[in-house]
Image (tube, rainbow, N blue to C red):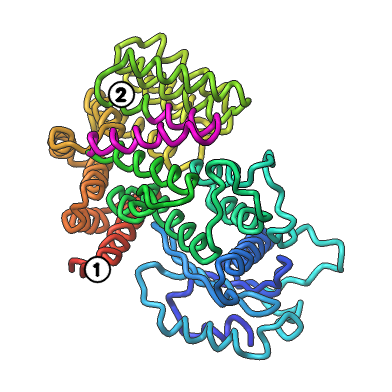
Amino acid sequence: MSLAALFDGMTEVRAALTGDRRGHVLEADEAAAENAEQDAATIAMAVAELDQASEVLGLGNLQGLQVRSGTRATLTAVAADAFLFVSVDPLRRTAELEKRLAAWESAPGADVEAATPDPAAPGARELPPPGTSTALPAVTLEDTPSPAPRDDPWADLRRSLVRAHLSEAVARLRVVADAPPGAGDRPGSEPLPREELGAAMQALLEGIGYVMAGDTLGGTRALRELASPAQRNASIRWVALYWISRAALNGSGLEAARAQVEEALALSRQLDVEARALSQLVAAELLTRAGKHDKALTWIGESRSRFERVGDSWGLGQTWLVEARIQAACGQEEACLEAARRARQADPAWDGPPIFLAGRALIRADLAGATALLAGATTPAAVRVRKLVEEVRQQHVSLEDAGEFLRLHHAAPTAQAIRAMERIAEASPRFLQAREALAWMLVKLGKYGAAQDLFTWLGAQPLDPEDRDGVQLGLSTVAAALAAAGAPSPG
């Protein structure tokens, strides 16, 4: 059955394509046609990796995926030899669509041979001859390239998890699960039964996802049990402590962060140089929040020396940018700028240093310089700072309030910070970024109902696509947090 016939009358469907498990396009509707080859290859790789992860975790065959974010919602049905990918309106119900996807999956046409379209049909693409496709092949965990493989698979898994490379971490899980007997002699590689290992990994991925989405309390709840002394594997416990520390630093729990950082530091001494360097990095951030800048600089220097020892450019970039923030807090602008430039040199692909430097340029009223620093940057964070510069140009917010807004973005959501953000929002009603930032502060404090009210209000305003994406992400995060807590979604 063609895509047009399958989704006839379903206005919630925005785009759809079918592909085989090697990443070849079988059919794409008009909305999906432009990027169909790249999308099919990407989806095929994701399906292959998740299929393998399902096997590692002891789950059944992958039958489908649902992904929702602030940008969009997608559903993917997976058959033996093909998949059907659909992008839908994130605000619409998908019950009927799910029924049609299930029917497609169980129908004979779900295999590659039956699904191959007529090349003359509208929106269809001719399959290339074998061996000539430019689409990427599906990658399984057995042949997934592993960055910097070492003799300790648990160290590789820790590295992936603390850097939030979650797909890579799932791939690392297979190596850990298949480690030969006796491989758990060193601290951090203590063996766990396969079922227990799978459950721990699932909780880690969930908790890290919550923290990255801005729900620091939800992340802490998901990770708390893994961080307890009862956890037998030191790697899992240390990763959980690391992310709980991050959650506490991003929230208002400075005392909670101190306890977690101390535990992580003690545990890291049993692991490796990178674990110690990362724990010291978080300790430096904690000391900065506490106003102990001299001690923070000492800790960041020790962290950097360890990253230098192992040639870790990612870690070096992180330490230099933390030092830039410390120097900014001390009022040492030249030292601050030099540290940020070194962060950029250490990790040129990271958008953190240019965003930070653009913020400092904005504070100096160098709007042209701020814009130049962000030229070519397309990440959501860079786009938002670029838009902040434009808001200042259009006098929607004063230069002083824009600088305060940037400072508050990196501060804990204390009562004082919330009052300051409320003042900015009230003083500049056309500057809607302030109200969105205020909503995220409420999320970090676990005030989900109030955050949802504010996100809902923002959703009714005339927003640019980037701002609307941020609001939709906020609504999705709040809804997930309320569902995880077993509470009904307000409204």
> Label 2: which residue?
287
- Residue 182, given in percent of the width and then of the height, sits at 65, 51
**264 is within the stretch colored magenta:** yes
- Residue 68, given in percent of the width and then of the height, sits at 42, 64
**449 is within the stretch colored magenta:** no
Q: Is residue 426 left or right of residue 357?
A: left
> Label 1: which residue?
486
* Quadrant of the rendered image containing residue 478: bottom left
The residue at 35%/27% (across/down) is 285
Residue 464 visible to the viewer: no
Quadrant in the picture for the C terminus: bottom left
Cα–Cα span, label 2 and label 1: 36 Å
Depth check: give the residue in front, 209 or 230. Answer: 230
Q: Residues within 10 Å of mark 2 (few under 14, many from 20)?
A: some
* Quadrant of the rendered image containing residue 21: bottom right
Amino acid at pointer 1 = Gly
Depth check: give the residue in front, 260 or 37. Answer: 260
Q: Is the residue 21 above or below the residue 478 in the image?
A: below
Amino acid at pointer 2 = Leu
